[in-house]
Image (cartoon, rainbow, N blue to C red):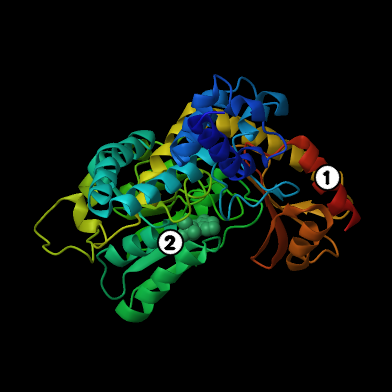
Amino acid sequence: MSLVQARLKYLIELKEKPVQNLLYENENSTIPRRSLLKGGLATGVIALLSGCESRVDLRVRKGLKRPVGVSDRSWKNIRSQFILKRGVTYMNNASLGMPPAIVAEAVCEGYETISKEPLHGKHGLQEKILSETVPNLAKTFGAERDEVILTRNASEALHMQAAGLKLKQGDEVIITTQEHPAGQRPWMFRQKRDGIVVKEVFIPSPLESADDVMERFEDAITKRTRAISFCHVTRGGHHYPVKKLASMARDHGLVTLVDGAQAAGQFPIDLKDLGCDTYAVSLHKWMLAPAGTGFLYVRKDSREKIRSIFAPNPIIEKAPDFDPPGTKDFPVRAAIGTALDFVNTLGVENIEKRCRFLSDYLKSGLEEIKGVKLLSGQMSDISAPGSTIFEKEGLDAMASVPMMEERIGTHIDEHQRDGHNAIRISTHIYNNRAEIDRLLDAIARA
Ligand SMILES: Cc1ncc(COP(=O)(O)O)c(C=O)c1O
């Protein structure tokens, strides 16, 4: 054995374990271990030596195609793109999505870049974010490039939009009883600090209809109302009629501020078409981007109504005024582009159909279980495709979370709102019917 050959052998042995963990931990992975070295020793070594990047390429090359149909069989290959720990079933996407391996790798690659060469690494990532990530995000969501401001999450965007709306003492803002704390607290703060009035409209679970939501809002509007602020999709998966609400608000001369944390990635969204003034997004839930990513959309012609607390010079009309200044988590932000590519390759409309297929299956199974009351609507116009909420007589929602983890290794969440002791199951493209059957069985026994 030559010296070079011996060195290559040593490197392969040294590197094999971590690579193996990364690529094969998911029992459904379709990438054969042998393929790492397929094409000759040199290819394998290049893959092993150059860190994150070549492993990403390997995965993308091997498996990412737009699936045809909604069945588990047609999505099996997509499932293998995720590196979920063996023995764990993840059904809590509405809290934090599970990025595919290529996204984890892109973050790793970004950190490598910035650690090897901080100055140029930072500039390179900044450039990528400005020239690729933000324009691609804007395109995906039907916005203009200058209307998108990256944030760390939806909560930050919700605080920015609520804090920025021009209001005076006595002005009213209407929200609903289904808002997430991040969509409610900034208004409560303004009520206390600025003397505005926050009116909460009661919205029942399950939703009755889109018209019912419209009527409840319309009934709450008075001469003093200045804005309406609500979720596109609530924490529990209720889908509000944003376009109609925004149009109604315009007719009344009101501003519309939307919480899109649970909507982005579940179905196609065209922000221009929705007609709202602002829209707050989480990218680390259904969009499968790295944790700590989101954005705020401020419609160009609404900038006058919503001022940024970060604007150094209020005369400048450009979107960067809204951008919180300072050093950013560049590697994480740059990796949003990889998640976007992943989601857009699969097709958001395809993802919606696949998620709907799974939650319909879950809902029909839940209906068969004695003592279960579904709190999610059945119709697609009032329920999001991924999240399902229900109560079961005698089953404490809080206790059910550790119980399902202990009994069947499945991660779910509670949804205690509006006096409901509900459980939330949020399923994404990589879940399957066998996992849902196991959960249904465990719920029936609980
Ligand atoms: C409806 C809704 N809005 C806002 C948020 C906050 O999202 P983020 O964690 O991105 O700040 C959540 C989180 O679960 C949510 O469900």
Can the viewer see residue 75 in this picture?
no
Of the image marks 2 and 1, the number of the one nearer the N terminus: 2
* Front residue of 32 and 399: 32
Q: In which quarter of the image is residue 20?
A: top right
Indicate which disc residue 186 carries.
none
Q: Quadrant of residue 272?
A: top left
Q: Does the closest atom of ligand 1 sit within 8 Å of the Cβ of label 2? A: yes
Indicate the amino acid at tag 2: Ser
Mark 2 vs mark 1, foreground winner is: 1
Q: In which quarter of the image is the C terminus?
A: bottom right
Residue underneath mark 1: 438
Residue underneath mark 2: 155
Give above or below for 122 relative to 243.
below
Can the viewer see residue 54 in this picture?
yes
Tell me the element at label 1: helix
Q: Residue at x 50, y 33 (%)?
A: 3
Tell me the element at label 2: helix
Residue 392 appears at what percent x and percent y? 81, 58
Q: Which residue is drawn at 39% across and 51% down?
A: 111
Residue 289 appears at what percent x and percent y? 47, 45
* Front residue of 130 and 230: 130
